[in-house]
Image (cartoon, rainbow, N blue to C red):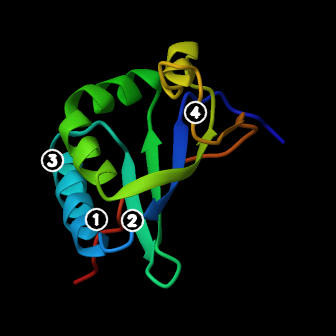
Amino acid sequence: MKITESRTILFRNTMSITDGHLDGFRKAIAQAVAFTEEHGPQLMVEVFIDEERMLAYSFQLYRDSDAIRAHWRLSDPYIREVMEHCTVRHFEIYGEPDDDIMAALKTPGGESFPVTHTPRLAGFTRLAHPHPTA
């Protein structure tokens, strides 16, 4: 097996939606994703909702740590709006982000929501949508 180099980083964020905030959460997520699609550096963003358990799952794929920093700079107001309707239950990082990215996930007091970090072994990305056939 050939193991290729990649700086690609995948985030998986599990959020608990605050009781009574489902509609606000949906609106805030829709605005955040629309802004990110237009202006963000992510290669992919997908959000899924389990309404029965009031959980949401966000997956974001980044080219590298610089793309994560750019996203944070651009999207801060949208992230704040989303966070008014939920709390982070667990945050998973797949890949090798820079040390400053890892440090930024901690609060000023040093505590953090649960974070796991799993280094990459191998893989590839095929994101282009196939062209519809006529």
Sequence-wise first label, 4 or 3:
3
Give the residue number, with chain letter if any, for mark 4. 112
Mark 4 residue crowding within 10 angstroms, few (<14) / some (14–19) / many (20+): some
Disc number for residue 38: 3
Percent coordinates x, y for residue 133 in the rendering: 28, 80
Please report the residue visible at 28 percent of the width from the left and 65 percent of the height from the top: 25
Return the disc, 1 or 2, that comes first in the chain's sequence.
Answer: 2
Q: Give the farthest residue toward the top.
A: 100
Q: Which of the marked residues, 2 or 3, is nearer the chain's N terminus?
A: 2
Disc 4/disc 3 C-alpha distance (Å): 30 Å
Cβ–Cβ below 8 Å for labels 2 and 3?
no
**Residue type at numbered disc 2:** Thr
Q: Residue at x 57, y 33 (%)?
A: 112
The residue carrying mark 2 is 18
85 shown above or below 130: above
- Residue 29: % across, % down: 27, 60
Tell me the CA gap for discs 2 and 3: 28 Å
Helix, strand or loop for disc 3: helix
Q: Nearer the viewer, mark 1 or mark 2?
A: 2
- Residue type, label 3: Glu
Q: Nearer the viewer, residue 22 or 35?
A: 22
**Residue 37 location, x and y as percent?**
22, 51
Within 10 Å of disc 1 (Cα), the crowding (few <14, some 14-19, many 20+) is many
